[in-house]
Amino acid sequence: MSEAITAEATQDIYFNPWDENFRANPYPHYRPLLAGPPRIIDMGFKFVLAARYADVRAILMDHATFSSVQPKGMGFDEQANVFGEAPTMLGSDPPTQTRLRRLVSRDFTPRRIRELEPRIREIAKNLLDAAERKGQFDVMADLANPLPVMVISDLLGVPPEEYQQFKNWSDKIIEADNTLPGMPIPDEIKSAFTELKTYFVEEIARRRKNPGTDLVSALVAAHDEAEALSSDELLQFVVLLLLAGNETTTNLIGNGMLAFGRNPASMAALRAKPDLMRGAIEEMLRYDGPVQSTFRTATRDTVVGGTPINSGMGAFVIIAAANRDPAQFKDPEKFDITRTPNDHVAFGEGIHFCIGAPLARMEGALAIGAALERFPHLRLKSPDAPVTYKGSYFLRGLSRLEMALK
């Protein structure tokens, strides 16, 4: 059966995360995938494409059958090697994943997130003040890029003067996703990762001598006192928190503002009734979320949605397609901030559900709410102009988004 699906897939679907045009608008390519069982495609290696909501959720909930450990020999070894051998929360299974997640969970409790609200409001105000003084507003450069990296850097105890350098490193490392399987990663991306790790090696040494109340100090203590983290795990942990803690929220704000710009009636409705913001954030996450897909590897022969999957086969778990599945969402192509229910999977499911989801929701709501309040005539500067995306399919985010203030 798998051979038949492979042959059929080549005729009516197109899936190429390394094609700039595909990345610019993958949603039309998801529709054929939503019309039938998971497809198997041959990209030098055979991969399954899981797109339907039920299939995506089934895979994400079954970590025993679908491993998060980065496989070797599938063409992605170069990308994996950049990050080193130490496991991370995202790229491990229990019991390692359970141990790592437990260490950081105390810094992402509802109480800790609420304590961050005044600081997030202050950052958003200062950034919007600067945009207002300029008389120009690039949502990405002026708000979506700096705010999340400032917040996660505060959590990590990073000095304010380092924010821009962190963002530069982060953006460059994310570009590794756009390296074709089997091809070498460009030297500038490797250099960015080396520089970032070197910075944190020095910071970890500094916190060991003079611990503070920040997250890095807490992780250093966990390493030193309980040996809960190896030295390599500690370094990988801090790097992952910086990358994951800013890039996805940046994309939530940017993609959300683009959706509002293209749906001015929704923007007006939210201005008139600010308590719609909670539902608006959920719809932004569903409609054009910051993460398009994640990856899993089958640990045994299994069947998902009627498609046989062999042990060792990789799976693209296309979260953004599931969030537009007509079997789960009425009028899925419509941006509707009053949509209810809205059980999207933008933050994943199961043991890997995004630990930073409450923080991302708060940052998105505060940043977008502040922008709409500050600029009552906000609109897309050029509604028909094409938008450009950064070089990652998996983390979908804009390079620029210019909006007019008057």
Image (spheres, rainbow, N blue to C red):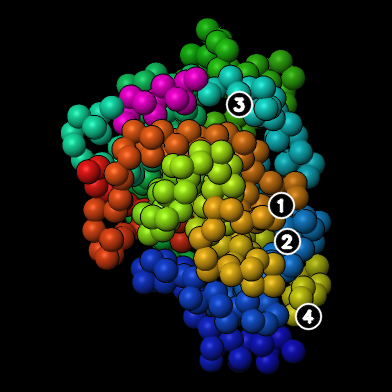
For the C terminus, the image quarter is top left
Separation of marks 3 and 2 at Cα, in angstroms: 27 Å
Q: Quadrant of the N terminus?
A: bottom right
- The tag earlier along the polypeptide, 3 or 2, is 2
Q: Callout 4 environment at 10 Å: few (<14), some (14 to 19), or many (20+)? A: few
Comparing 343 with 107, the one in front is 343
**Identity of the amino acid at label 4?**
Gly
Q: Which residue is mark 4?
A: 306
Residue 57, numbered label: 2
Left or right of 76 in this view: 170: left
Task: Name the residue that disc number 1 marks.
Answer: 349
SS at badge 4: loop
Residue depicted at x 46% and y 53%: 266
* Residue 140 visible in rendering: yes
First along the sequence among labels 3 and 1: 3
> What's drawn in magenta, residue-wise?
118-128
Counting residues from the N terminus, which is met first, the one under dot 4 or under dot 3? 3
Q: List the single residue furthest toward the top.
A: 210
**Which residue appears at 25% of the width and 34% of the height?**
131
Could you classify mark 2 by the number of other residues whose Cα lies within 10 Å: few (under 14), some (14-19), or many (20 or more)?
Answer: many
